[in-house]
């Protein structure tokens, strides 16, 4: 065993997968396994399974992905294998011989972070020290952004030049394609390169560990035809949909306060921080994406939307609330009384806006009040419109008590009985579901045949049985190799009868060839749903598998139509009827 493989084993031995994953998400014990709502995609019914026997996890939902404790950490922290290994080694106190590891993905990412870090330094230096940044500094001063804040957020200034960053970074021995890979330069039609950010205040966009993923740049002159804000394009490290400005700085405060304040823009986030509201992050736009919600859900389960004053009722907010409901977030709203956004609200009346942030309003009360305010007179016509505006929000409330509270409230406002509201909700919910299903249809996993599912179930039940010796004995008594339709399960079964050792989950894994490992792991992860519910217990499942196998054999013999088959058909039919009799008895 190489020293690296040895270290990996040591790390895995020191981390129990149930404890480890349980530290990130709530696991519920189900039989021998643990289940949870998958932390990597949004879902209502848990399809994320952890097997303590095999020390592995798997998502049977949209992800269709799984692995060991290291793989979980890679996915959770969005890091490469090598990064995960290094960090887990520190955590477990295992000494890692890093010199023998060549991790190209990691090296490439590290190089991209390095370039971004240098660019940020360069921009920051210009903003703080250089006369070309005079106007930029004035803009920031007007917005109450001190030198200290400039340095905390590493704000910078990209000069009005086509190649100043190129000159700076190529001197540091980075190639033009390197710079293009992080989106800092653009390749023109004639193959020449130029700086992407010019004459802009730049904000480094970081991940929660402080790595710079990309930049956003705000124009100095807003009337020169260019966009007010431009961003780094999608790169290997920058994905707009998962980025939250300020997360590196607010992370700890979000954890401590168990809540996050979502604002729209960079300046709003910085203003919050300046005024001592330290748990804010900016979503950079008016839409909260699913990926952003997933990042947040790892820190807290309480969102306060402190978006611009005009956000209410927008489609994106509706979608965000729906996703947030699925992820079990509590959502509240804080709308500024004065000023169009948090930045302005702070500068008009600090004390008042802080109070608003401290006492946010329940999202549903907010939606109802906001809608009612648009209709000074309530008549039959406006009732219809009010219902249409509010129902899309109420329909996604998961908690039945909260839901019935709002159904009652809506029925009082509209002066109709609760049942008719309920009917509206059901209709709306159905049409929404259709839309959602259409979207996800491509993500559905391949459906296994019933025969194969039952074979899987039999092996799964055997391996995870509390009385493993007894289960193995029964299995060997009833089933033979030719009872399997699945080649993979047949091979696993074959290995099982060949094995002379006493069965344990780990020792048997070592006997299996590499190509069977995944299927073996799957057997531990789940006694999967079987198309009929009446064959739940082990004995019945065994007999059902035998019954299906006998029926297949008889059908094959009959189709072959040979004379000497008849006797065999008779034998098998007798066997079949005895199995069916026993199935009836158990
Ligand atoms: Zn998943």
Image (cartoon, rainbow, N blue to C red):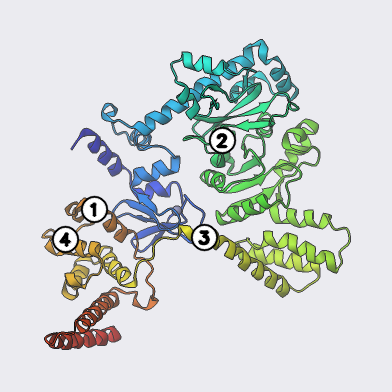
Q: Which residue is mark 4?
A: 495
**Residue 340 position (above or below residue 527):** above
* Crowd around label 1: few <14 · some 14–19 · many ≥20 (10 Å): few
Whole-number angstrom distance, CA of label 3 to CA of label 2: 27 Å
**Residue 555 position (above or below residue 337):** below
Side of 346 relative to 486 (left or right): right
Residue 203 is situated, as x and y percent measured from the top left of the image, at 61, 27
Whole-number angstrom distance, CA of label 1 to CA of label 3: 33 Å
**Residue 454 position (above or below residue 345):** below
Q: Quadrant of residue 135?
A: top right
* Crowd around label 4: few <14 · some 14–19 · many ≥20 (10 Å): some
- Closest to the observer, 452 or 343: 452
- Marked residue nearer the N-terminal end (1 or 2): 2
The dot on residue 247 is 2
- Marked residue nearer the N-terminal end (2 or 4): 2
Could you tell me which quadrant the C terminus lies in?
A: bottom left
- Closest to the observer, 407 or 187: 187
- Closest to the observer, 558 or 80: 558
| Front: mark 3 or 4 | 4
SS at badge 3? loop
Q: Quadrant of residue 574?
A: bottom left
Residue 242 is situated, as x and y percent measured from the top left of the image, at 54, 41
SS at badge 1? helix
Side of 422 relative to 562 (left or right): right
Whole-number angstrom distance, CA of label 3 to CA of label 4: 38 Å
For the point 54% across and 58% down, which residue is it? 439
- Marked residue nearer the N-terminal end (1 or 3): 3
């Amino acid at each position: 065993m190489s020293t690296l493989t040895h270290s990996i084993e040591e790390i895995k031995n020191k981390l129990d997968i149930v404890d480890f994953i349980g530290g990130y998400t709530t696991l519920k014990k189900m039989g021998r396994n643990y289940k949870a709502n998958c932390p990597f995609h949004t879902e209502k019914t848990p399809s994320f399974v952890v097997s303590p026997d095999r020390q592995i996890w798997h998502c049977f939902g949209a992800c269709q992905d799984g692995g060991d404790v290291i793989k979980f950490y890679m996915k959770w922290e969005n890091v490469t294998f090598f990064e995960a290994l290094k960090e887990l080694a520190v955590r477990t106190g295992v000494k890692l011989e890093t010199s023998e590891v060549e991790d190209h993905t990691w090296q490439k990412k590290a190089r991209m972070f390095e370039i971004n870090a240098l660019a940020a330094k360069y921009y920051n230096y210009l903003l703080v020290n250089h006369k070309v940044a005079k106007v930029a500094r004035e803009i920031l001063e007007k917005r109450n952004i001190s030198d200290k804040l400039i340095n905390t957020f590493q704000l910078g200034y990209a000069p009005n030049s086509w190649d100043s960053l190129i000159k700076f970074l190529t001197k540091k021995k980075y190639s033009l394609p390197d710079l293009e890979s992080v989106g800092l330069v653009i390749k023109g039609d004639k193959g020449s390169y130029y700086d992407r950010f010019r004459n802009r205040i730049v904000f480094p966009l970081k991940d929660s560990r402080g790595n710079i993923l990309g930049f956003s740049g705000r124009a100095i002159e807003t009337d020169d035809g260019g966009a007010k804000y431009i961003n780094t394009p999608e790169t290997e490290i920058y994905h707009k949909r998962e980025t939250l400005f300020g997360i590196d700085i607010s992370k700890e405060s979000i954890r401590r306060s168990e809540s996050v304040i979502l604002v729209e823009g960079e300046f709003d986030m910085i203003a919050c921080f300046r005024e001592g509201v330290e748990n804010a992050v900016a979503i950079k736009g008016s839409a909260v994406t699913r990926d952003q919600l997933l990042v947040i859900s790892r820190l807290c389960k309480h969102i306060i939307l402190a978006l611009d004053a005009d956000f209410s009722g927008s489609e994106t907010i509706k979608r965000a609330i729906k996703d947030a409901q699925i992820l079990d977030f509590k959502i509240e709203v804080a709308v500024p009384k004065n000023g169009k956004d948090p930045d302005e609200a702070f500068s008009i009346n600090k004390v008042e806006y802080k109070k608003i942030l401290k006492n946010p309003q329940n999202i549903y009360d907010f939606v109802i009040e906001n809608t009612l305010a648009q209709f000074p007179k309530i008549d039959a016509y406006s009732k219809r419109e009010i219902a249409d505006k509010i129902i899309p929000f109420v329909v996604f409330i998961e908690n039945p008590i909260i839901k019935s509270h709002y159904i009652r409230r809506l029925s009082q406002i509209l002066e109709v009985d609760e049942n008719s509201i309920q009917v509206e909700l059901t209709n709306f919910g159905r049409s929404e579901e259709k839309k959602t299903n259409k979207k996800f249809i491509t993500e559905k996993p391949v459906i296994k045949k019933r025969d194969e599912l039952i074979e899987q179930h039999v092996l799964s039940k055997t391996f995870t049985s509390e009385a493993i010796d007894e289960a193995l004995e029964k299995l060997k008594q009833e089933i033979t190799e030719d009872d399997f339709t699945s080649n993979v399960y047949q091979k696993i079964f074959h290995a099982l009868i060949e094995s002379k050792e006493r069965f344990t989950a780990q020792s048997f894994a070592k006997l299996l060839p590499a190509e069977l490992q995944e299927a073996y792991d799957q057997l531990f992860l789940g006694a999967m749903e079987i198309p009929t519910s009446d064959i739940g217990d082990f004995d019945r499942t065994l007999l059902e598998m035998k019954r299906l196998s006998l029926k297949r054999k008889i059908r094959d013999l009959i189709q072959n139509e040979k004379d000497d088959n008849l006797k065999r058909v008779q034998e098998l039919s007798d066997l079949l009827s005895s199995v069916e009799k026993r199935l009836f008895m158990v």
